[in-house]
Image (tube, rainbow, N blue to C red):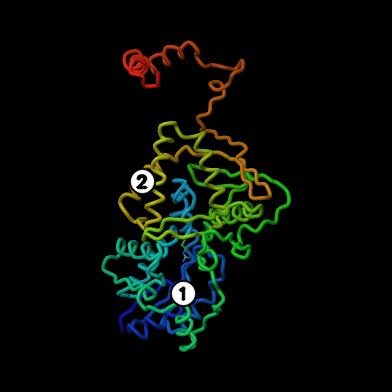
Amino acid sequence: MGKRLVLAYSGGLDTSVAVHWLKAELGYEVIAVAVDVGQGDDLGPLPERALATGAIDAFVIDAREEFARDILVPSLAANARYEGRYPLVSALSRPLIVKHLVETARRFGAVAVAHGCTGKGNDQVRFDVATRALAPDLDIVAPARTWGMTREETIGYAEKHRLPITISRERIYSIDENLWGRSIECGILEDPWEAPPADVFTRTVPSATEAFEVVVGFEAGVPVSLDGERLGLVDLIGRIDAAAGSVGFGRLDMVEGRRVGIKSREVYECPGALALIAAHIDLEGMCLERDVAHEKARLEPRFAELAYDGHWYSPLRHAVSAFVSSTQRHVSGEVRLRLTPGGGLEVVGRRSPVGLYDHSLATYDAADTFRHGDAEGFVRLFGLGIETWAARQGMAGGAFGS
Ligand code: ARG
């Protein structure tokens, strides 16, 4: 038996050339694995194509349910958005793909894993760091990082070796897609001043002509229903993605700071992810005790950075997730979302059987049970330190001008 390697295979240009190159240049027996994380394409034909390209074995792993349960649920619980906006679409699939590469490597006695990432992006960081966390003994081979071919040369290599690729020289965008959304880079988008051409969008193409509402139900921070109908996670995410996308909601256009130090212009379509995050944040407003809510909001950007930076399998990400998960027990209830053509999404109502909103405390009408007499003394003590400071130093010291 020769030395074996498991390649994360997408059927695209780079991973197709990689199958051939790893065999021809490095002498590996290549096992090609395509992990289905909800790309939306039919991955069925991929194994045959990988075998035709020179792989000794090839298969598809359907990881959609696992992706939703083990990665998207904890990310939604953390309302995770990198730089306050990007819900981490591509960053989230990598740890799961690596988990399956490693499992496959163990099953076939492989000595290495490989991926098709270039040296300029974040995805290589995520693949490599996750592999080193899960399987430090395996080698990591990243042919596209070392072969030194331009895109044109890579196409030339595929043509020379008659590799079955469907890529044309005109295909300009680099696209990565899964259940949580779609990332689009390259081509004209490399000019941050140029508006994204209409042809980059597929999940946010407006089709709805009238406003409509969707009710999202949550149990312990996990979305469980739409309009009262209980749904599995994969279905639910797909349905809300389509609904929110139909009014054109969910587009992002941003210049983002990559882990490798490069600023890049990114366009994303994440209608479902951003709708669920909006609903979840709103329900937390009703269900989380105030101090818990504020502390959680401070940790959320950290969670997003860790996921973005490829530190999914790290002690800090686990610790932050443990905190976040301990806050979700009572995040249960329903949120009304109103979607309007033109890309509008608003939360217009929420209710929860375990919410902390107490009408008899909040109301200004006759149902009021709040003890008004308690307020004056509380507020006096709350401001006592400032009152003392103002009398001795603040005013006398001219803190607010003369
Ligand atoms: N910039 C995004 C990220 O780092 C998107 C990466 C998309 N990957 C791709 N191969 N097109 O998460």
- Which of the image's four quarters has the N terminus? bottom left
- Residue extending furthest toward the right: 209
- Return the x and y of residue 25 as percentages of the image width and height: 34, 84
Give the farthest residue toward the front.
Answer: 402
Residue of label 1: 59
Whole-angstrom CA distance, mark 1 to mark 2, is 35 Å
Q: Is residue 195 above or below residue 55?
A: above
Q: Secondary structure at mark 2?
A: helix
> What SS does tag 1 mark?
strand
From the viewer's side, name the closer residue of 342 and 313.
342
At label 2, which amino acid type do we have?
Answer: Val
Left or right: where 389 falls relative to 371: left
The 10 Å Cα crowd at callout 2, few under 14, some 14 to 19, many 20 or more, is: some
In this rendered view, identify the residue nearer to me: 176 or 146. 146
In the rendered image, the quadrant that contains the C terminus is: top left
Which residue carries the number 2 mark?
320
Q: Residue at x 42, y 62 (%)?
A: 94
Occupied quadrant, residue 133 = bottom left
